[in-house]
Image (cartoon, rainbow, N blue to C red):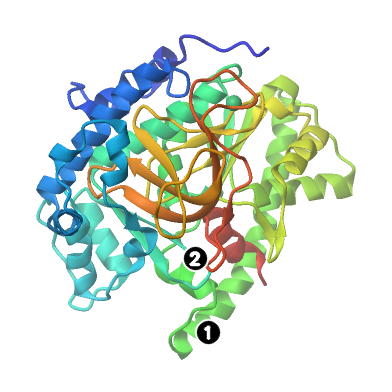
Amino acid sequence: MLNVASNIKEIVDNILQNYIPGEISSPVEKALYEPQMLFNEPKEKMDEYRLKAIKYAFKHHYENNKFYRQLCKENGVTPDDIRSIDDFSKIPLLPHRFYKDYPSGRDFALWLANLMSVELPRIEIEKRKPTYDDIIEDFQKAGITVCFSSGTTGKFTFIPRDEKTYKMGQYAIARCAIEMLSHWYDYDTNAYLLFPNPKKTNIYVGKVANVLFDAMKNVKVAIDTKITTDILRISMGVTFNLKEKMMYKVIKAKSKKMNQEMIENILKWLEEMDRKNERIFFAGAPFILNAVMERLREEGIYYDFGERGAVLTGGGWKIHEDKRLPVKEFREKVKRYLGIPEENCLDLYAMVEGNGFMVHCPEGHYLHIPTTYYHPMVVDEDGMPLEYGEEGRFAFLDSLALSYPGFIITGDKVKLHEECPACHRTTPVLEPEITRIRGEEIRGCAEEMRRLLLEG
Ligand SMILES: [Zn+2]
């Protein structure tokens, strides 16, 4: 049995004070900031938090978001209709494609503003013909963080988060991750973020991982260049003119070199951490750590970090175009080359459209769902809810998304269980291997990184 720290909320709250509002007042804030555990409160208590939080969020979007209210009217649903958790199925869901259907130029700013359910500060669009990146910067100046993620076709998903929603998201990811690693967690740890620098990009995985800088004493970043939507799109080979075609070649040549340097830097860091007997934590894209371990294999190096190490992966499991790295195989590799035990090697599943952070339990590596503030569903191709244990499309109601309606049907194929087959936590779980629904483009934040770095 793992020794679970019972005061983990106290420990995290102490470190993350800047992410907690002075007064916890709304049912959404209560559902996130009050529970001692996000994955293991008594079921009735979690249901109560969730019912109040989702009801509040639904009413909020109904009252403050013109297009969403219109959608509710078309479906004949009002906030008064949501009285119990059973009524959640009446809440109109948005297909994830909705957040991809954006125009260009100044219209993009208007489109973003219309998605939002909060009163907007004055936003100056400085350029006459702004690019997506220009508008993202202008929104940032007004305190709105527009995060994005992209699929293989170069089409983006854009989600605008106001300061409150962004802070709640960061607090949530930290609480969820640390709770599952509570047997191991210690602030006095050196972390390596295997994602782009959150301070230099609005790619969602990078952005939400920003909280890591506050959760551990030293944080290094694997990808330290500025990554805009233009750079990302061009690196995927989606180019619109000759200049961009030239840029594509330059980016490719540069990223190959960057990739080699990145691996060298991580290898040096590992050696130093081992020598100094330090605690280490890897957080981010599994393919990067896999590349590091391949080098260790070639050089016949085996570290034994043991209980001093942990790994939290996220963002997707493709290592080559068609090759998926099974999570179990990955854990065994981490054990072999870094000496980090399997219960310290967890995966996190999340997406740019939501603030639900589903994390492996160390006992069985099932993805637990934080159901005090987030309601998971599985639906069939007609959007009808399926039973527990049936395979279908993942959908969710996310109460933390106050700046935009977070009631969404995704393109991911999952299986949901009411109880974890492996541990005694009270929250429902998803089976660990998540794939895309056929016909949906490959996505995931590690996937875009992988293309940016590894394809020459
Ligand atoms: Zn479990």
Q: Please give left or right for residue 177 compared with residue 290 in the image.
A: left
* Residue 451 % position (x, y): 60, 65
Q: In this view of the protein, can residue 146 be seen by the observer?
A: yes
Q: Residue furthest right?
A: 300
- For mark 1, give the secondary structure: helix
309 relative to 293, above or below:
above
Mark 1 and ligand 1: say if the CB distance to the nearest ligand atom is below 8 Å: no
Q: Amino acid at mark 2?
A: Gly
Q: Check contact, mark 2 vs mark 1: CB within 8 A.
A: no
Q: Earlier in the sequence, mark 2 or mark 1?
A: 2
Task: Establish if 220 lies above or below 1.
Answer: below
Mark 2 = which residue? Answer: 151
Neighbor class of circle 1 (other Cα within 10 Å; few <14, some 14-19, many 20+) is few
Whole-percent x and y of residue 20? 28, 25
Residue 71, percent from left and from top: 19, 58
x and y, in percent, of residue 65 in the image: 14, 52
Residue at 75% in and 35% down: 271
Find ligand 1 in the image and state its quadrant. top right
Q: For this view, does 323 lie left or right of residue 381? A: right
Q: Does any portion of residue 400 appear in the rendered image?
A: no
Spatial CA span between label 2 and label 1: 22 Å
Residue in the foreground of this view, choosing between 175 and 456: 175
Quadrant of the image containing the N terminus? top right
Residue highlighted by disc 1:
246
Task: Please state which amino acid type lies under the numbered disc 1.
Answer: Met
